[in-house]
Structures are given as structure tokens and as C-alpha cells.
Amino acid sequence: MQRYFYNYPYLRYPNTNIKNNLMTVYGKGNIKVKPDIATASIGVVVENKDLSVAQAQSIEKANKILDTLKRMGIKERDIQTENYTITPEYDYIEGKQVFRTYKITNTFRVTLRELSRIGEIIDAAVASGANVVNNITFTIENPEKYYNQALKIAVRNALEKARELGDTLNVIVNNTPIRIIEERQEYRPVYRQAVLAASTEATPIMEGVIEINAEVKVILNYLAKTF
């Protein structure tokens, strides 16, 4: 014999038609969070026809930048080499390829934990020789915690829709879902570009807010009222 178990409010309606129907609803949850961490690409590009001279210049400038970053309070664990390339550059004169110079790019991926000091740190790095500052990205160190909050909102949103549908269709919706499926998780870091210019004030970098979105599909039982 097939047995059925229904949660409250089914117990209030002993004369309900015990016919298993399924309802599928979708819920969305969104929260906005201020970032608590940032990363930036900081480094130097040098050019010289003599490769050994270019390498020496690159090393000297990179070491000055690293010393400055550490002096500004950046820990070694928050600095890693992002890109180091040596590229011969050519001009084309009358259809012929003519060597012009060697170009060395040396950049570091720097994690910045004091967001209020980003402009100050960038300016100090530039003053020490950095001529590359880009890909400034504001993120959250622990996004999962905030995603779980958005997920709860999404589930509540789906259940509210189910209740509204139940009232509209005059059916009894089981409050306990049969299944909850995560449809989409979206986390949007904020990207910024530093504008480097001579100034007596620190370069302004606005972190903005980060949107975290969750979407779920919720499947529930519902019963038709027969009274």
C-alpha cells in the first residue's frame, strides 16, 4: 500500500484529494557587499638596444618597486611575479624588418588589504619607478559566506512565489520542497583603472560594491482542495 505523508497545513484538511502534483518555481537572491581586498598589476617596462643594459635597468627598477611596496606594509606573501618577458621590437622600413630595441616587461600581482591606502601605495610605487599599473580588481576574500546569504534569499523568494501561486490556484502547497537545485551562482568583482598623473594628492581609486547573485529551482508538492 502506498503511504503519503504531508506536512502542515495538510493536517488541517482531512478531505483533500490525495493526488500528487508537482509545482516548480524559481527564486532569486541578490546582495551587495563592499569589497575587503584588492589586487593590482604593478611593474615596469624598459627598452634598450643592448639586452644586458635593459636587463640591468629592469632589475634595478623592479627591486626599487619591491622595496617600496614592502616599506608601505605589503607582505611578501602578497607579492608574486605576474609577467616577465623579453621582446625584440622591430620597425618596418621600406618593407624590411629593422631591429629597434629590446623591451622587457616585469610586473607583479600585488594583493592590497588596506583599501583606503590603495591610491597612496600606487603613487609610491610610481614614484619609485613603476610605469605599469593596471588590472585593479576589488574582490571579497571569503565570497562563499555572502553567497550563502544570497542563496537563503533565493530560497525564500521561491517559497513566497509558491505560496502566492497556491493562493491564486486555491491549492495547498507543501511547505517542504521535494528538491532544491542551485541554478546559477554569480559573483562580480569590480574592475578599476588607475589614472596616473602628477598631483599633490593620492590617486583616487573608488572600490564600489560587489554584487552576489544566487538562483534556485524549487520543486514542491501541491494538493487540490476538495471541500
Image (cartoon, grey):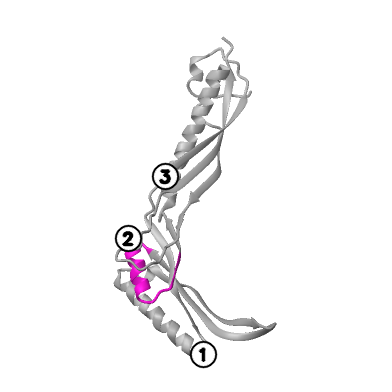
Q: Which residue matches tag 1?
A: 50
Mark closest to the chain's N terminus, 2 or 1: 1
Instruction: Decide: is 72 above or below 86.
Output: above
Mark 3: which secondary structure? strand
- Report the span colored magenta: 112-134
Badge 1 crowding class, 10 Å Cα cut-off, few under 14, some 14 to 19, many 20 or more, is: few
123 relative to 182 in the view: left or right: left
Mark closest to the chain's N terminus, 3 or 2: 3
Question: Is disc 3 in contact with disc 1, using a CB cutoff of under 8 Å?
Answer: no
Q: Which residue matches tag 3?
A: 32
In magenta stretch: residue 119: yes
Instruction: Decide: is 226 above or below 145.
Output: above
Q: Which residue matches tag 2?
A: 114
Residue depicted at x 39% and y 53%: 35
Q: Nearer the viewer, residue 91 or 130?
A: 91
In magenta stretch: residue 186: no
The answer to whether one can see residue 159 in this image is: yes
